Amino acid sequence: MMELENINHFLESFFSLYDCPIDRPEKNLFSIQLNRELDEALMNRPFYWHYMDKLGQQGAPMTLKLNTDPESEEKGFEWIHFGSPRLQQIFSYIQQQAMYTLLYEKSDGVTKTALYPWLVGNIKVSYLGKQKKEEIFSIGLHLINGIMLNNMMKKLENIPFQRVMSDYSYTLSPIIKPPSGFYRIFQYIENEISTHDNSWAIASLKTLQEEKELLDYFFQHNKDVQEFYENEERHLTERLEPKIEISIINAGLFYLSAQTVQKLIQTLQ
C-alpha cells in the first residue's frame, strides 16, 4: 500500500506542477490532460508537432491515462509502477529539466514576512539483485533547526509558491548548509532502509552462490576458457549481487513563512 501511496502522491504533484488537469475517477486511476510540453516529452509524437508547427496550428495534446493498482482491471489505462518504462521516462524528464529549484512562499506583499529555508529532496532508492524494486522518499529538512519531515511534497502541495519573493518578504540565512543537509537526508534514508526486511538480499546472495557453483561445475575441467569463465562470473555478480542505490530525482530550496513552518511541525506531534 505504501508503494501505491508514494506513486499516487508523486504523480499528483508532478502533473499539478506542470498545470495539467487531472481527473481521478478512482483512487489509483489518473486521466491527465497533457499540455504541449509534456506531450512532447512523454508521448513520442515529434512528427505530429513538427507538422502542426509547419501548418501554424496549435495542435492537440493527448490525454495520458495511468493506473497505479496492479489488481485493477480498468481498460484503457496504462499500469505505471516502480521500474516501469513510463515512470523512468518521467524521472528522466525531471532530471533533465528541473533537477534543482528555488521557490518562495507567496505572501500578501504588504506584511513584513520572514521566510525560513527548507531543503526538499525527492530521492529514489533502487534495490538491485535477483528481484528489482524502487521506492521514493520525499524529505524536507529545516536548514535552521534541523527538523526533518517525510512525505514533504504531499505536505507542500496546497501552499502557493513563486520564483521571486513577494514584496516585504525576506529570507533567513541557513545554519545548515545544503551539502550538509543532503548528508543528513541520505543518513536518514539509510537508517530507514536498515530497518526494512532484508530477505530479498539474502535470497539474491543464495541464488548468486548457486549460480557460481553451477558455473564452477561446468568449467572445472576446462582450463582453456578462463577468460570466458571470468566474464560469466562477472556478469552473474553484476546481475545478482544485492545492492542499494540512492539517487536524487530532484531537489530545491523552499522558503516558508513561520505560520506554514508551525503547521508542518505540528504534523510530527
Image (cartoon, helix red, strand yellow):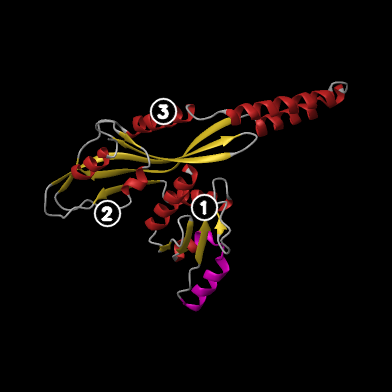
> Where's residue 186, x and y in %?
42, 31
* Residue 36 visible somewhere in the drawing: yes
Q: Count neighbours of disc 2 (C-alpha within 10 A) and say few if under 14, some if 14 to 19, many if 20 or more.
A: few
Q: Secondary structure at mark 2?
A: loop
| Magenta residues, start to end | 40-57
Numbered badge on residue 68: 1
> Where's residue 62, x and y in %?
50, 68
Q: Earlier in the sequence, mark 2 or mark 1?
A: 1
Is residue 51 one of those drawn in magenta? yes
* Residue at horizontal 45 percent and vertical 74 percent from the top: 58
* Residue at horizontal 53 percent and vertical 52 percent from the top: 69
> Where's residue 147, x and y in %?
29, 32
Q: CA distance from mark 2 to mark 3?
A: 30 Å
Label 3 or label 1, whichever lies nearer to me, is 1
Task: Tell me the residue that label 2 is attached to.
Answer: 160
Amino acid tagged 2: Pro
Q: Count neighbours of disc 1 (C-alpha within 10 A) and say few if under 14, some if 14 to 19, many if 20 or more.
A: many
Task: Tell me the residue that label 3 is attached to.
Answer: 187
